[in-house]
Amino acid sequence: MTTQTPNLEEFRQDIRRFLNQLPDSLVEKGRLGRALAKEDYALWHQMLHARGWLAGTWPEEFGGAGWNAMQRHIFEEESALAHAPRVLPFGITMLGPVLQKFGTKAQQDHYLPRILDGRDWWCQGYSEPGAGSDLASLKTSARREGDHYIVNGQKTWTTLAHYANWIFCLVRTNPQAAKPQEGISFLLIDMATPGITVRPIVLLDGSAEVNEVFFDNVKVPVENLVGEENRGWTCAKYLLTHERTNITGVGFATAGLDAVKRMAAAQVADGRPLLENPAFSLRLARVEIALMALSATNLRMISAAAAGQAPGVESSMLKVKGTQVRQAINDLMRRAIGPLALAFPSEAVDGANDGHPPGPPEAAAGLRQYMNNRKLSIYGGSNEIQRGIIAKTMLGL
């Protein structure tokens, strides 16, 4: 796909034709919010890579499609509406841009093609038990010994680490640094290295998509350092701006709002569809207006990035508002499904109650998403932290 004055309507139709090729089983999992297996993610990855659309916003020189802001917006919107899986961000949205900006030519030549063809599945080693939103207080250490670093410590909330064969990590290489942001380095670590242990964390909805990762004297080659030693915070901030923009999830919010409208039209309260209830329709209108404003702001942000401007404090604004909108949509769905929202973790969200489903599959999906998406305003830097960044950077407070 060329970036030269694309015909956006033709592009949208091309996306839709491609999405129509998705297996019904994969679409059904997406529609009902069911957990995807590693094979599901791999199939979606392979389909996109074969079409040349996996890394839509990467520059063509690195194997990307070179999409502009509107093409990216259209792809994400149509994919969400078609209930396609999300493109896992760890390799494509997070590590890829970091390597393109800070990696050596050798690192780019080795790792970027392996991200694209699926040989490497990445996870993110940022958060620790005592360093979540306050990421600069991380304690995982990397001590230089000859041509290796010896890594010790723990990461937590590591999404899909049980599937990954590589992890990019923030580690402390200079514990005597004057400021907590100093003395941190960015390392690429093979998950097969002796001394790494992965343990699942069971979530509120009964799933175990996140993990603890322990490092016990793990040897990492020095050539796996990205950027300069003790300057990893620069890489970390650059990655987080991309992560926070990605969390905005305009496409998922659009699909979620459509699902709410369908459910509210089907649910009857006081002899008429819930969608006609004045109080509910007012809540719905407010959320829809907020989503329209979010979508427009997101497009401006992506356009600026496409013009060469690095994402700044705007990514924090998008993260806060985007997560608020998505959680508001989840709350509307909870209200729309009514008493069925009283169901509770794994048995309920799997639609099982002594063998009898508690309601339509869409209700179970809505309940699952409501519980799982409480995380949206916490991960990627909590919304409270983001408001602090906005206050300091934009308002000078």
Image: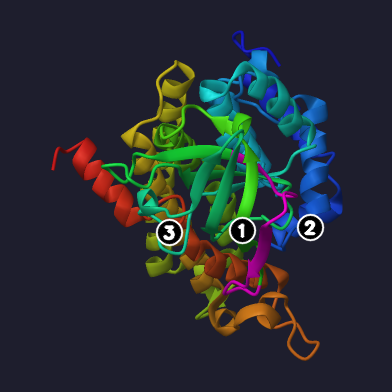
314 left or right of 344?
left
The residue sitting at 45% across, 42% down in the picture is 173
Can you tell which mark lies on residue 378? 3
Q: Amino acid at mark 3?
A: Ile
Which quarter of the rendered picture does the N terminus lie within?
Answer: top right
For label 1, the SS is strand
Question: Looking at the picture, does residue 370 appear above or below residue 146?
Answer: below
362 left or right of 173?
right
The range drawn in magenta is 188-206
Question: Which residue is farthest bottom?
Answer: 354
State the residue position of label 2. Answer: 37
Q: Amino acid at mark 2?
A: Ala
Q: Amino acid at mark 1?
A: Asp
Can you tell which mark lies on residue 78? none
Work out whether residue 348 can be spotted.
yes
Image marks 3 and 1: residues in contact by CB distance under 8 Å: no
State the residue position of label 1. Answer: 216
Q: Is residue 202 magenta?
A: yes
Residue density around tag 2, few if under 14, some if 14–19, many if 20 or more, within 10 Å: few
Between marks 3 and 1, how big is the CA–CA gap? Answer: 28 Å
Q: Is residue 83 magenta?
A: no
Q: What is the quadrant of residue 203 in the picture?
A: bottom right
For label 2, the SS is loop
- Give the image location of residue 126, x and y in percent: 50, 50
Give the mark, 1 or 2, whose residue is nearer the N terminus. Answer: 2
Give the mark, 2 or 3, whose residue is nearer the N terminus. Answer: 2
